[in-house]
Amino acid sequence: MEKKRVLSCIQPTGNMHFGNYFGAVKNWVKMQESYECYYGVVDYHSMTMPYQPDKLRQNTWDLIFNLMAVGINPEFLFIQSLVPEHAELSWIFNCFTPYGRLMQMTQFKDKSATATDDGFVSAGLLDYPVLQAADILIYRADYVPVGKDQDQHLELTRTIAQRFNNQVGKEYFVLPEGLHSDTPKIASTADPLRKMSKSAGEKHSINVFEDSERIRKQIRSAVTDAGDQPAGEMSLGVQNLFELIKAGENMTAYTSLMEDYNAENLKYVDLKAAAAETLVALSEQFREKRAELLANKKDVKNQIKASSAEIRKRAQETIREVKELTGLMNVKF
Ligand code: TYM
């Protein structure tokens, strides 16, 4: 039987943090065993906010090494700009996208509100979810493992696929389904009311490759009681620390601390120590793996260029069929 297809992507904006890892990337690693997988570092997406060109290229490679260090097989990895058909399909999809829906996207509203001083908001930021739909549909993905913050984008992808199918009179695109991990929404330890995020500022994310002392320090200063929950309910900060322990599969600590909580004698210092050690253990292992990969930088880069070229062939097949279906021209070689 043919394997089902999985696609997911990550932006090369800053480092990979534990929200990315526990919310999505850990699932990517797991799914490699039984699915046909496509995992992209989406550099076209990172141009939608103000950025520096030389930093973008550096971040893209850094993220490739990081993804491989946590266990992604390089054969499944590609760099989006090495598969320019994503941008081509995105244009075609623009013509099947109700633009009003783009204006309503939470991410657009949030990010356009934090525009630069001169008030510049790019059309690319508005169009961002259409490119994301192209990323997903170009490989005809069945499943998309993502964090909870991507649900709205997934919903729009399904709308675009459906509208396209209706227009061409054929169920050409499968409607993809989002998949969540057990911890699809990791909060910032500095402010548990917001999600862990690289764009919100340094203290709002913990880098997966951070040195152990800094991880301990960040967790030590985690906010536990921000008065965000009614009395008697677990505060969001404490919930988040438990989530981190669970996501890191430190179940002995999790069970015993939860017993303490239920017996009303949980000490935050113990909870924080367990959360910190859970992350440190993972991080040490990942840093070691990354150092090995960095010792063969050139080989890894060549490998990724080759896998991107291979994956591009799939994207080209879809584009050829889409152009046939939509009345565009195909060059015959
Ligand atoms: P990005 O780069 O912000 O994040 C990559 C993945 O990490 C998840 N994530 C989180 N999960 C749980 N808790 C958090 N605090 C947290 N922060 C991030 C995200 O949900 C995501 O799965 N728009 C996407 C990139 C993208 C994409 C795609 C994803 C472009 N094309 C096609 C899937 C399919 C984004 O900005 O992810």
Image (spheres, rainbow, N blue to C red):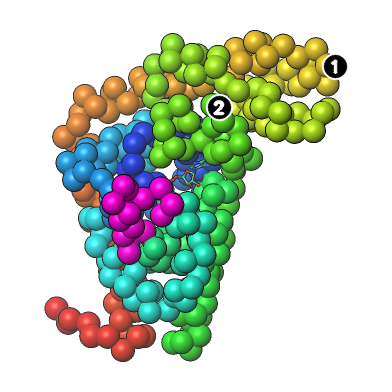
Q: Image check: 57 left or right of 75? A: left
What residue type is disc 2 on?
A: Thr
Q: x, y percentage for residue 233?
A: 80, 30
Q: x, y percentage for residue 111?
A: 42, 51
- Dot 1 or dot 2, earlier in sequence: 2
Which circle marks residue 189 in the picture? 2
Q: x, y percentage for residue 72?
A: 39, 39
Relative vertical location of residue 50 with respect to residue 312 in this rendering, above or below: above
Relative vertical location of residue 155 with respect to residue 6 in this rendering, above or below: below
| Residue drawn at x 36%, y 30% as measured from the top left | 69
Is residue 113 found inside the magenta-colored segment of the image?
yes
Choose mark 1 or mark 2, whichever is in front: 2
Q: x, y percentage for residue 255?
A: 74, 21
Is residue 303 found inside the magenta-colored segment of the image?
no
State which quarter of the image contains the C terminus. Answer: bottom left
- Front position in the image: 260 or 298: 260
Part of the protein shown in magenta: 112-125
**Helix, strand or loop status at disc 2:** loop
Which circle marks residue 263 in the picture? 1
Tell me the chief SS of the magenta region. loop
Q: Could you tell me if residue 24 is visible in this image?
A: yes
